[in-house]
């Protein structure tokens, strides 16, 4: 049985202050590779003192644009996260799901318009 | 050219009006000597240096030479302790009460520099108003949310300006971040493909999970989190952007139009440091159910 892949947010960012979107992107890129390889990932927030929604949106929120919710739920776990930070992460995740639902609706609408245009041209 | 500031520059609607009026009158000057006369100015809220500094920087970007003249001693003391006047030829004076939060300018790529600034001002500081660990953490997060918003949405070339002030006896902290970016009205109007007023745009941006973000990284939480925090804390949140002004306090929002626009966005937060809430939210879900 494969061991879980552990990613330390503190190690990736190099600071207890996880606040910038581009730092979140570094965490995302590692998570995305592991999820694509069907690995189970434990994301550790040990030694992280401060996070923002911008960081978490880039690190985790954008995963919902690439991976199915079920896949993320089954492969990704978090540990050593303070309750206040877990509450923020939950908000980010719930908002990301809504964001990508809307975007799917938007993309669907654009596709329909383009199909109508094609029909008119035909 | 000489422009006079009024008696009071506070972080309120009138304070924003006074500084945006100065900008409106001076913004088209190039290669001029511009004197800002503070002879009548008897009070200047220190955190408004972020707004004042942004405007003066913008005037300097037009190669104007800006000087502050006739600064009264009390105001000079405030603006010297936080380092603001050192940008205009004066020297810093020691902050013996340790209540000043220094004036700084950042580029959008300076997130590490900004983090260091916040660590210095709020974590490694000797004297801070007594406040709970939960509140301190929430306040720091809020400041970073404001800075992140400026980085993500302003598209500013000229930078992000910040300044603050501690009031231990009044149990409050004021902190202001100003950017010289495109402003909320332009971002929201382009996103909605509809020309709306700056007031309406700020209201839209602070409601529900509205966001102008498009692309792979979601958004739409920063301003909402700030508003929720202020509601719990009993503080105040103000936003000025373009010619819109918005304020939230006592769980109620109001907005007004400014006579003259600010060339970017300002977010001002005032927190009540006597607040004893833990800010550890009770949850009906397990950490394994986050996703």
Image: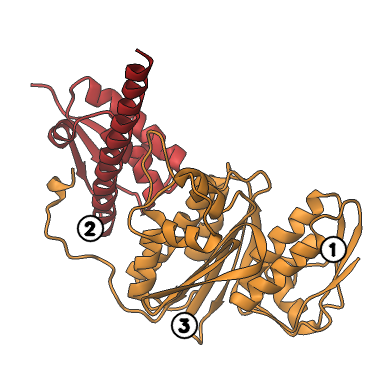
Chain colours: A red, B orange
Q: Is the residue under label 1 in contact with that under label 3 (CB below 8 Å)?
A: no
Horizontal and vertical percent for residue B49? Answer: 67, 67
Horizontal and vertical percent for residue B240? Answer: 57, 64
Labelled disc at residue B153: none
| Nearer the observer, B197 or A67 | B197
Residue A24 position by quadrant:
top left
Q: Is residue B83 left or right of residue A35?
A: right
Task: Report the residue at 29% width, 75% height from top.
Answer: B277
In what element is the residue under mark 2? helix
Q: Give the crowd class for mark 1: few <14, some 14-19, many >=20 residues within 10 Å.
A: few
Query: Same subunit under labels 2 and 1?
Result: no
- The residue under label 1 is B89
Labelled disc at residue A83: 2
State the separation of the CA atoms marked 2 and 1: 48 Å
Above or below, A120 against B175 in this view is above
State the separation of the CA atoms marked 3 and 1: 33 Å
Above or below, B178 against B193 in this view is below
- The residue under label 3 is B171
User: Chain letter of disc 1?
Assistant: B
Quarter in which the C terminus of chain B is drawn: top left
Query: Same subunit under labels 2 and 3?
Result: no
């Amino acid at each position: 049985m494969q061991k879980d892949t552990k990613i330390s947010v503190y190690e990736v960012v190099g600071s207890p202050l996880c606040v910038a979107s581009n730092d979140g992107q570094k965490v995302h890129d590692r998570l995305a590779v592991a999820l694509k390889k069907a690995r189970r990932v434990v994301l550790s927030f040990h030694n992280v003192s401060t996070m923002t929604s911008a960081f978490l949106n880039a690190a985790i929120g954008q995963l919902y644009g690439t991976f199915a919710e079920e896949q993320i739920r089954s492969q990704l776990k978090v540990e050593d996260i303070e309750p206040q930070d877990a509450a923020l992460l939950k908000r980010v995740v719930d908002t990301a799901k809504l964001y990508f639902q809307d975007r799917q609706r938007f993309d669907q609408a654009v596709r329909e318009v383009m199909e109508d245009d094609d029909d008119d041209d035909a | 050219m000489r422009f006079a500031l009024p008696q009071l520059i506070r972080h309120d609607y009138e304070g924003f009006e006074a500084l945006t009026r100065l900008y409106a009158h001076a913004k088209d000057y190039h290669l001029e000597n511009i004197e800002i006369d503070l002879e009548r100015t008897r009070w200047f809220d220190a955190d408004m240096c972020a707004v004042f500094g942004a405007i003066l920087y913008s005037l300097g970007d037009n190669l104007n030479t800006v000087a502050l003249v006739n600064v009264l001693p009390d105001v000079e003391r405030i603006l010297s302790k936080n380092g603001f006047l050192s940008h205009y030829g004066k020297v810093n004076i020691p902050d013996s009460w340790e209540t000043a939060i220094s004036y700084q300018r950042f580029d959008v790529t300076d997130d590490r520099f900004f983090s260091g600034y916040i660590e210095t001002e709020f974590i490694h500081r000797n004297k801070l108003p007594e406040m709970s660990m939960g509140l301190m953490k929430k306040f720091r997060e809020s400041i970073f949310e404001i800075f992140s918003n400026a980085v993500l949405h302003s598209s500013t070339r000229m930078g992000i300006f910040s300044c603050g002030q501690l009031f231990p006896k009044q149990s409050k902290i004021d902190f202001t971040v100003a950017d010289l970016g495109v402003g909320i009205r332009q971002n929201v109007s382009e996103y909605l493909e509809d020309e709306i007023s700056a007031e309406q745009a700020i209201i839209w941006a602070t409601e529900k999970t509205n966001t102008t973000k498009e692309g792979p990284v979601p958004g739409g939480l920063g301003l909402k989190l700030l508003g929720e925090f202020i509601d719990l804390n009993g503080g105040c949140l103000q936003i000025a952007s373009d010619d819109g002004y918005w304020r939230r306090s006592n769980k109620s929002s109001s907005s007004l139009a400014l006579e003259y626009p600010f060339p970017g966005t300002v977010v001002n937060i005032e927190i009540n440091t006597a607040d004893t809430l833990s800010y550890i939210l009770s949850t009906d879900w397990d950490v394994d159910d986050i996703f």
